[in-house]
Image: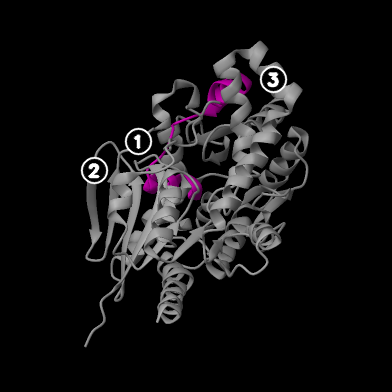
Amino acid sequence: MNKAPLRVAVLVTLVWHDAAGGHVKVWERFMEAAAGSPDIDLTVFFLGDAPRVIERGPRARLHLLPPRLGTHRFWFLDSGAGHTDLAGFHPALAGLLPGFDLLVSTDHFSFGRTAAAVALSEGMPLVHSIHTDVETLTRTYAPTILRRLLGTHVGGWLVTALNLGERLGRAERTRLHRHLAHCGHVFVSRPDDAEAVTAIFPHMPISHLRRGVDLDLFHPRKRDRAWLRARFGLPEGRAVAVFAGRADGSKRMLVAAEATRLLLDRGRDLALVVAGTGSDVPRARALCGDRLVAPGVLPQADLARLFASADVLVFPSESETVGNVVLEAMACGLPVVLSGRKGGTARLIHTPGAAGVVVNEGTADAWAAAIEGVLGGDRAAQGVAARQGAEAGTPTWSTVFREDLAAPWRDLVAADRRAAA
């Protein structure tokens, strides 16, 4: 007799839409991988305008629910990081969760807290998957929100006098720890997160959740300089640097723009293409003028062609749990310049110096020097090294789902059932 598939609910308190960030995109990829799973039935809950179920396969679907107190209602909370739900409990979600075999929270906001309450009342297993550095994001966005709400003078004074960015960041970390106390297992994507969880919960089971790459979609054969020039209005011979992601302080996009400005002042014929949206685009344009190209969020097919056709990815972010765009760029054979500071993505370069450069300073001068070094190198050799690193070190989404999620989920549910017997 065939066993019934394991029913797993994943909770993501973010709005699902085409231009959503990496947290949402990761679970879209996992849904695609789960669609043909023989024994996992996966439902991923997101926020949406109206209740809706979108089937992604015989055993995978999105379930959208409206927020009870969405941040979109408050103009001063539009940070660019994606809207969430400020409510402490979501009754409609709570009514849908009983009957699942496993609950997987990915944040400690409305959906995550609701899952914790349901797991406790129903005796259901709850695990957590860390996808966002909430402490760093809070430190970045909270001061901006307070200045927007209270004005530059009063808000700025309060932020500085009370060190509110740090205080609120630590408070958010405490809220996460309170949520993890309800969980029986934690999935992490970087060593720093594992160490932080172990420091607070020494006996918490932890496993590593990798990220995958579609090595066929993101491939060097997509390289097409003629398309690049036509698509973005670039003259022949101009070097092209790319930044991809939220164009704001959370990803430190302005560092890329400032470094570009320095190189322009030194006579380098360079354009910076920003594939993303965010509050720092106007400031970057003021710095770089017409050498800044900001097409917004690109479809995956266009992003792959951009990566394959450009000269370097510049990604100064220090808030990444992984950095999907770095993996995708390297799979396209694009050399990368990455931050080596805590929270950066330097660990993704398997062959430093060949596939990319690590910058251990935060100054525009240091980043300009690193970009200049890559642009002065052998682009073909760099591309080969980047692609080889991606092929050797990055699994497919199907492999990650099968090995890093489905297998541990089965073991967790089996252990919970044995304990309950």
**Residue of label 1:** 68
- Viewer-nearest residue: 228 or 90: 90
Task: Determine whether 266 is above or below 105 in the image.
Answer: above
Span highlighted in magenta in the image: 280-308
Q: Is mark 3 in CB contact (under 8 Å) with mark 2?
A: no
Distance, label 3 to label 2, CA atoms, is 40 Å
**Residue of label 3:** 158
Residue 9 placement: quadrant? bottom left
Q: Which mark is residue 264?
A: none
Q: Is mark 1 in CB contact (under 8 Å) with mark 3?
A: no
Q: Is residue 284 in view? A: no
Q: Is residue 40 left or right of residue 242?
A: left
Using a 10 Å C-alpha cutoff, classify the residue at mark 3 as few (fewer than 14 neighbours), some (14 to 19) or many (20 or more). some
Image quarter hosting the C terminus: bottom left
Residue type for callout 3 = Leu
Residue 116, given in percent of the width and then of the height, sits at 45, 55
